[in-house]
Image (tube, rainbow, N blue to C red):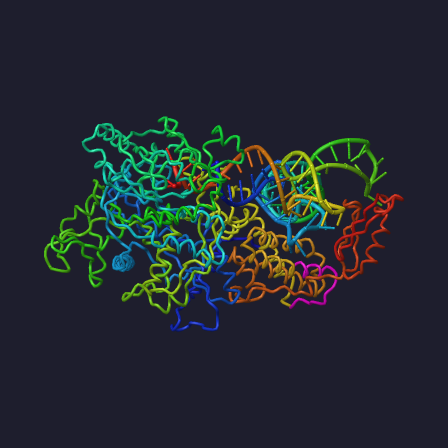
Amino acid sequence: MSGYDPKEIEAKWQQVWADESTWEVPNPGQPGFDDSKPKAYVLEMLPYPSGEPHVGHLKCYAVGDAIAHFRRRHGFQVVHPMGYDAFGLPAENNAIKTGEPPREATERSIASFRRQFREWGISIDWARELGTHTPEYYRWTQWIFLRLFEQGLAHRTEAPVQWCPKDATVLANEQVVDGRCERCGTEVVQRKLEQWFFRITDYADRLLADFDLLESWPEHVITMQRNWIGRSEGAEVTFRCEEARLDFPVFTTRPDTLFGATFFVLAPEHPELERLVAGTEAEAAVREYVDRVARESVEERGAEDREKTGVPLGRSVVNPVNGEEIPMFVADYVLMEYGTGAIMAVPAHDSRDYEFAAAFDLPVRRVIEGEDPEAARDDDGLPYPGDGPMVGSGRFDGKDNRAAYDEIVAWLESEQRGRPAVNYRLRDWLVSRQRYWGAPIPVVYCAECGTVPVPDEQLPVELPEVEDYAPQGKSPLAAADDWVATDCPRCGGPARRETDTMDTFVDSSWYFVRYLDPRNGEAAWDRAAADHWLPVDQYIGGVEHAILHLMYARFFTKALADLDLLDVQEPFANLFAQGMITRDGAKMSKSRGNTVSPGEYVERYGADTARTYVCFMGPPERGGDWTDEGVEGVNRFLSRLWRLCEEVEERTAAAAPDPAAGGEARELLAKAHWAIDKATRDFQRGFQFNTVISAVMELVNDAYRLKDGLYEDPAGAAAVRFATATAASLIFPFAPHLGSEVYERLNGERVWELPWPEADPELLSSDTVTLIVQVNGKLRDRIEVPAEAPKEELLALARASEKVGRHLDGRDVVKEIVVPGKLVNLVVR
RNA sequence: GCCGGAGUGGCGGAAUUGGCAUACGCGAUCGACUCAAAAUCGAUUGCCCUUUAUGGGCUUGAGGGUUCGAGUCCCUCCUCCGGCACCA
């Protein structure tokens, strides 16, 4: 007998799947397409190819592959593609350091990912493989950019943007974490630059409303997106500065507190600020304050316990509800990016305004009573953010503040001093990057014609070769003079190309559509293919993409649907967010030295062990801590299954199991059917792979316990063979090589071509059950009873138990609870 | 501060609907095999008390409640993790 040799069997089956292109599926209308089967699009987030794959990749693709196999064996035609999100900063930073062109490092990494995915035995349709860095792909990224441009959804605007000094590029708001660059950790600063944006804010309401269209997404991911979009309902109210003859609209969610406004604040970046103070006494102080704020980093300005600072403008505005003149200030706690960059300050009911009022000794006027009327009189308990009856608010006094809310807004509207308004935290998506390794933005600038889109037939605008990849405040592309200088497509005159490239999130916002028609040179995709396969039925990836990638892809899908290029509103019907694997309780990192290289484990234990282990560690949506002992435990289990297979092959002949078998043969058959039932249900119930695998372990354990007593009897031998083959069939989605090998040896069939097994209800039930007998809710005995025994019989059996009798001890039974087939509880006094 | 999620043995974790708490795995202990070790196979393994059993008590972050019966439902509190955060 030879031992379990994963190297040999894994190579064998990988060869079969490669030679036969087993996992390739055709599109509708192509040869081999099977219309009788329902479709399933199973997709894991495409990897960013940098170096070698890590354990996060292993887990993601192990989970996704298990789902793909499960669906195939339930009769679905499954498309399960793979590609590479190949543009991006790390390859470029490497190029700056080593001089190696980013394309070469990227291609090398892709080769490594491709090889390892094959070694892991992931069932990928390789005919659909793509890389977002190839001209064949980014041609269509550019094409989509042009469609968005035509719709006014891509626009170039000067705006204050987040700039990373280290990477020398602008960042999307989403890429700034705690005031620092998400990639390199450098504090970002604000700069005013002309940049390309996508109008994702136009879709804010649909991005919120269409959560209803999703079948199953983790609640916390939806919540994160909802918070990110940050929709606030309120009113826009206009305050007038008579001296300067300027109107200042503000956004407020609390129009009910308008009577409590005692001052007015502008953001330091407010465009009217200069005009307001020019030539006044306040001018010098204001200018100095604004300059100081401009020099501060985003992180400093947003610091939690920052003191309120500001400067009076020496101007005032009129409160439209009561005609009162209130003084104006500039202060950095008001942000230009949210609302109108100006606020009415109500210190009695807003903690920030309260702090500012305290620092500048400004009046605080309560206009909403709290729960305690005493407190309302002496102004204790301020600031008070809650609800209550209104006071000091003229004709609204005594009214409930929530009830008066609409009335006040309606009144403002009738006076043309306000209107209902909605504000979002979400900003437009800044897509320009002053970097080399990305898809060039397909636009040229002409002195005569202005901004001109590159015509479709001139796509792709290919990345030029450059010598120096380091950005110098401009894109490295700007140095490629021959490339930058071009002819205007409109007038033929001299023009210059846009030298910025696109954020790589643009590339990954539509790749799931390109998979469906990846070799199409005439169009981004064939409409029929897209309509057939979309939406993605099951999307799998890490929570770290809960906001950025998923929201951008949702936005793209909606925009493309509006262009009548797609007919789905949502790209991903079901989302599974996998948890992160740690080592020694900490996130893996090279600096900490606690990384796990999947390749090493695959080499030592085989891919089946590594894949099954990451699925067994715990519920896949939760994280888990990687331990070598745990890996060995799973390897032991797979070896046990292997040895069982070898023994069964030798000691039994192929024979159908006998459902009428009795004794231990029946016990083992029943266990096999129990495992089928349990595995199937847990698989469907949120991919509880850890318990699916433990059910198969239990089956193998029982086979070991019972096998020696069963070989002699033909029905018994058949039961052991069935149990072993069933274990192979059930473990196949996680350990496809071993599953295939064992199944083929025992049944001569290819397990992936067979339907998922079904549990026989006859073998799931049994003639007797274990009756739990309790006295006063405490377990006192277990009795084997006929499954169908009526209540009276169960009670009699329970009372007859000696152990129970000991606890009854002559006391009165005041209540009898009987749950047929399960339990009897006798309540005594 | 606001919004989510989670607290179960030495560890990772399991427990359909309120009905056997601790499945499965790791670790540990003992035994078989062996000259020996590894591997393998088998047994034991929540805690405490009397070791006389086939004995008793306790146990799911803490406290309270509902119920014949609570890891599961309700209330109060504590801790940890994740997200957002001067967003008007």
Q: Nearer the viewer, residue A686 or A116?
A: A686
Residue A317 is covered by the magenta coloring: no
> Seen in the image, is A751 located left or right of residue A86?
right
| Horizontal and vertical percent position of residue A600 | 45, 45
Is A97 located above or below residue A707 in the figure? above
A149 to the left or right of A807? left
**Does the image show residue A318?**
yes
Q: What stretch of residues is rendered in magenta?
A: A656-671
Counting from the top left corner in percent of width and height, residue B70 is at 69, 44
Instruction: Indicate whether A312 appears above or below A465.
Output: above
Please state the total of marks drawn on the protein image: 0
Which x, y percent locates residue A786?
A: 79, 60
Residue extending furthest toward the right: A810
Identify the residue at image location x=35%, y=27%: A360
Left or right: residue A491 versus residue A560 is left
Q: Position of residue A144 (x, y in %)?
A: 29, 59
Quadrant housing the C terminus of chain A: top right
Q: Is residue A184 visible?
A: no
Above-or-below relation of A65 to A102? below
Camera-side residue: A218 or B29? A218
Q: Residue furthest front?
A: A395
Residue A658 lies in the magenta-colored region? yes
Which quadrant of the figure contains the N terminus of chain A? bottom right
Q: Quadrant of residue B64?
A: top right
Decide which of A408, A153 is in the foreground and name it.
A408
Q: Nearer the viewer, residue A245 or A97?
A: A245
- Asked where in the image residue A568 lies, by quadrant, the reply is bottom left
